[in-house]
Amino acid sequence: MSDTSEISHSECSVDFKKSDCRSSNGSVVAPEPVAFCVSKWDTAVSRLTLLLLTLAYIYFWVYFSYAVAGSKSFMNLVFTLLAILLICDQIFHLWTQWVFPRMSRVAVSMKDSDFRIAMIVTKAPSEPHDLLVDTLKCMFDQDYQGKYDVWIADERPTPEMEAWCLENGVRISCRFGIEEYHRKDWPKRTRCKEGNLAYFYDKYGYENYDVVFQFDSDHAPTRTYLSSAIAGFTADPDVGYMAFPSINGASKSWAGKGRTWLEANYYGPFLSAFSYNPLDGEFLMPNCTGSHYAVRTSALKEIGGIGPELDEDLSTTIMFMSRGFKGVYSIDTIALGLGPETFESAMVQEFQWARSAIILFFRWFKVMIPNYKYFTPGLCMRSFTTLYYYISQGLFVFWILAGSITSYYMDWCTDASKPCWFSLINFLLRTLPAVLIAYGHYLMVRKRGWLRAGTLEDPPPPIFASPVVWLYRALRVVWMSRGVIAGFQELLFHKTPQFKVTPKGQNDVAVLSVANLLPLYTIYLTFGAAFWLPLIWKEPEQMGIALYMYICAAGTTCITIFVVFMHFWENGRADLGNALAHVVVLALLIAGLVVTSVLESRVIFNAAAGNLFIPVEVFPHEWIVMLIFYGISIFSQNEALNHDYLLILDIDNLLYNFSMPAGLPAPGQSYGGWEGPNVEVRGQFMGHYLSALAFAFKSTSNNDDAKHEFQTQSDALLQGLSKCQAAHSDGYLSAFPKEHSDR
């Protein structure tokens, strides 16, 4: 065993602010190995948030049911798919909000324990020596007062690495040349982390250690790492593993920061609420994260060792759970990693994780879950949501493509005189209440210091204030959906997937080639083909609304430009790969948008397209709900005043300036002002007034009496104007005499 504190390494001394942990009665507690962290006040806020979210979702589904009822039959498939996705997503959100008060924290214990402890870091051949040295130094520099061994699992250590390990007391686990541990598949697969760890546990781990902490090479533990975690294993003999936050605190790329900020809530209160806590006996399976986690070796041996696939952290977690072992999540046990150094590296990881998850759940299901003996309703829910998360990514991309393309191919919302209930603005307005409520709870969590991203002295920005978070969220869905498809392809053709190790700690940054952005170009070309192909055999007037597709294509272009620009900004032109090719492709994307908007502007920017951005009242008395959620009483009152004003204007007075030049009787009188009989802009008001009547007609879609009044007023005006035009006999219609046109 190695004594601690032999090496002082200042980079390992990042301390995280600890949240007060409270018992169920709200008092601060310390003796328990695992204690609740949420006060009575915060629990009440969480319960209020849950209630408001439920009301917001009910409001959304009332709107959704009316929108479906008012849609054409062709949209039912799209609506059904969207409804399934939203129902699953909303149930999951309500459930996580319900368990939020279970947040817990592991007590700090620096004293020696009875456990035989090891810390092991796995090394890939491509990872540099200096990166491993920094992590190993941080392993030695722990404030834990007990003893532990430090190991490295290396495929084939270099002489330099061997010499450093010998000099500093690091033990080496190496399977080089042992054929049994170089198989093509799990559990002793060649050239992968789980194969390296399988050899370590078989050869050393099971026999010599009780608890082992595993690390990726770039995740350097902080000084309080062991002392903040070890008590978790004393909470219950059935605790088989411990999970910790995976934080890329040293990431310098926009993609790395975007992922870290996006996942700050996941690695904070989200997983902490799923932790096993002896105080209530509940266990909801907090996921291990491959960058670093800990196992009880006796439990690991009983479940059959480290799980299969690249997502070995997920498979190992499920194997523990399905065999009756519990997991504790320690929110304060931190190991800071480098994270993806480029956008390309980040997307490769998202793609591989999604592909691996699909293969896990469909190929290795019986290995992970041999039976359902230990499943509780909570664990069933947790397992379902884990699988649903990955599949939903692919389905959401499909829905965006199908929804926008279908709106173009079919007769949907193409009548400008009728309201479009399921439009872009209507959908967003009905989802916004739930988003704002959830965001308010997020701000509370951020203020409490429960998020986990970098250091708590530099917390992640509010989500709405960080476009990087939204961009990364949108892009990861594209690559994850590609990974889901690839996973099913490899299952269908019985292929064993090959994995790419993303570069870490290297001076040479991965080149961003044009091929790396192929998924974005594919989406753009899909929209382009869907737009232009029907015009070969159909007239533009026969097409539906194309603005959805145009917005999506323009958004894809902007995101692509951003990705290329940021890679250039962060790494220089040399790392762009074929820079000229990027310029040419981006120019083609922009040119395609410009040419399309010029040649087919009547298809894209027509009156019906305005339906997408005009909010309408969908069900009776909805304004009451809108008032509660948005406080728009002033808008509603002013809208009512405008409607009243439109209806009190006299038809004869409005037609006066048109009747006089036509030689018709004019029983009314001019309204004066701009409409005065001698004013050079008279008659202009008529066009604005007719437009106002049309908008008023649309905004009162559920008030038949008001619609009838606006329709009657409009018909009377049009009939009067038609008489004036007929009186001229040559189609002339104006508020000015004919001779004025010759001036």
Image: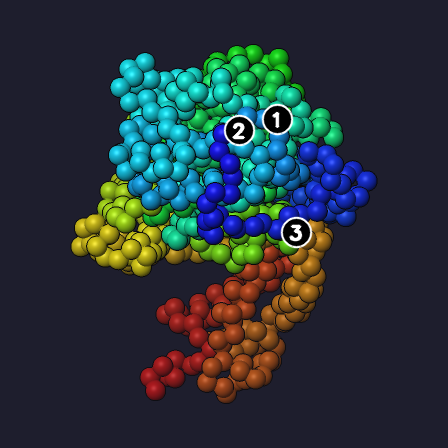
Position of 49 with respect to 168 (left or right) is right
Q: Which residue is mark 3?
A: 448
- SS type, badge 3: helix
Q: Amino acid at mark 2?
A: Ile
Q: Find the distance from the CA under tag 2 to the CA under tag 3.
A: 33 Å
Compared to residue 474, the image places residue 87 above or below, namely above
* Residue under the image location 63 percent in, 71 percent down: 649
Q: Amino acid at mark 1?
A: Asp
Is disc 2 surrounded by few (<14), some (14 to 19) or many (20+) residues within 10 Å?
Answer: many
Compared to residue 287, the image places residue 599 above or below, namely below
User: In x, y percent, where is residue 477?
Assistant: 42, 40
Q: Find the distance from the CA under tag 2 to the CA under tag 1.
A: 9 Å
Q: Which residue is mark 1?
A: 114
Q: Amino acid at mark 3?
A: Arg
What colour-coding does the image apply?
A: rainbow
- SS type, badge 1: loop
Q: Marks 1 and 3: CB-CB under 8 Å?
A: no
* Residue under the image location 66 percent in, 51 percent down: 448
